[in-house]
Image (spheres, rainbow, N blue to C red):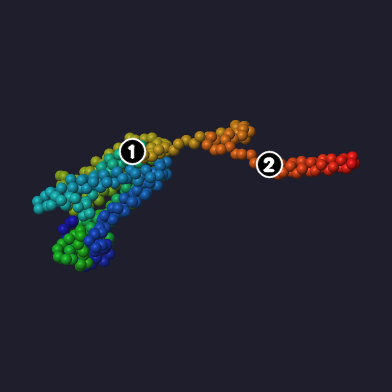
Amino acid sequence: MSAPVAATANSFLATIPSPSQGVWYIGPIPLRAYALCIIAGIVAAVWIGSRRWVARGGAEGTVIDIAVFAVPFGLIGGRLYHVATDWHKYFGPDRNPLDALKVWEGGLGIWGAVALGAVGAWIGCRRRGVPLAAFADAVAPGIILAQAIGRLGNWFNQELYGAATTVPWGLEIYRRVDPATGLNDPIGGVALDHTPITVVHPTFLYELLWNLLVFGLIIWADRKFRMGRGRVFALYVAGYTLGRLWIEMMRTDEATLVMGIRINVFTSLIVFAGAVLYLVLVRGKREDPELLKGKPEHGEAPAEPVEPAEPEAKAEPEAKADAAEPDEPKADEPEAKEPEATEPKAAEAKAEDAEGDSQARSAGGAKSEKD
């Protein structure tokens, strides 16, 4: 933060107020606006990247699988870059080195986040069998949008601003204190008095708006020229660093200086030159959508081919043959006994009895005639 600058009452007629606080508590659990903005940016980046990946021919869910590696690597890289370039804030006289672990208080260098995040993305792409350059092109717009959302966290933390100004869009900076002790607490405290101690250039807002412009630019360029092979990502890097160059020179917060110039100015120049060189040298058509399909996750079996059904003409004779042959009785089952024809035998016995009676009567008649 820059040193407070006295402000007049007329300066505050059309300025931007800062939030009264950036941390709220749900019981003992702190709810930090900076962390929420970072999380919201990550969600937006993954959502946009997933939609673009599928639209380019990739498989659903690939971006989320790769983000599992890229996001943690990016957060670690961003913090490492910030601590390395602002080491005096953590390892200088009367400083606590453990403060380097307090990511929630702000301090993520985009250069380290992109560099180490790319390593995590490379690991994820290798596991999924997809080209890293194509993945970078798909997620590039989401990354710059995530950076824009993340800058809102700097607003809540009252950090990353420029020199004192009288422009109508100047940012009001308040004194925040710990309500319990009354001691200064710029990050976790509350502004009990909303009289600004200074009005400054909101450089975080300048970068937020610039990032949105770059977001629109790369979306338009990608649709118009069907860019591929990492060129969308290179355009994002070139666009962002160009804006970061002039915004960085407006900032007045503490930073490591090289020859009296902020180190991030040199970083922006070098990275910008590399991105432009990549755009000039790399040519070729967009990747074949088949290359974006990738391979199944570990443990997933590819779908088995379905065998074609046999023709009906061939199956019909076999069915007839089966119908012609009687089923053989099974060994375990007793053979079925034929039912006894009781009624025909009874009728036959009655007929024999009737014939016997007839013969007896004939014999009796013959005997009578003889008598």
Q: Residue 367 at what x, y percent from top left?
A: 87, 40
Identified by mark 2, the residue type is Ala
Q: Residues within 10 Å of mark 2 (few under 14, many from 20)?
A: few
User: Along the horizontal axis of the image, is 178 left or right of 60?
Assistant: left
User: Residue at image x 33%, y 38%?
Assistant: 127
Which quarter of the rendered picture does the C terminus lie within? top right
Q: Residue 70 at what x, y percent from top left?
A: 29, 44
Q: Nearer the viewer, mark 2 or mark 1?
A: 2
Task: Residue at the far front: name it.
Answer: 371
Q: Residues within 10 Å of mark 1 (few under 14, many from 20)?
A: some
Which quarter of the rendered picture does the N terminus lie within? bottom left
Checking the image for residue 341, the label placed there is: 2
SS for dot 2: loop
Asked where in the image residue 4 lies, by quadrant, the reply is bottom left
User: Residue at image x 23%, y 49%?
Assistant: 108
User: Residue at image x 16%, y 66%?
Assistant: 180
Identified by mark 1, the residue type is Arg
Q: Which residue is mark 1?
A: 127
- Give the Cα distance between marks 2 and 1: 79 Å
Compare residues 110 and 283 and report the one nearer the observer.
110
User: Residue at image x 29%, y 50%?
Assistant: 147
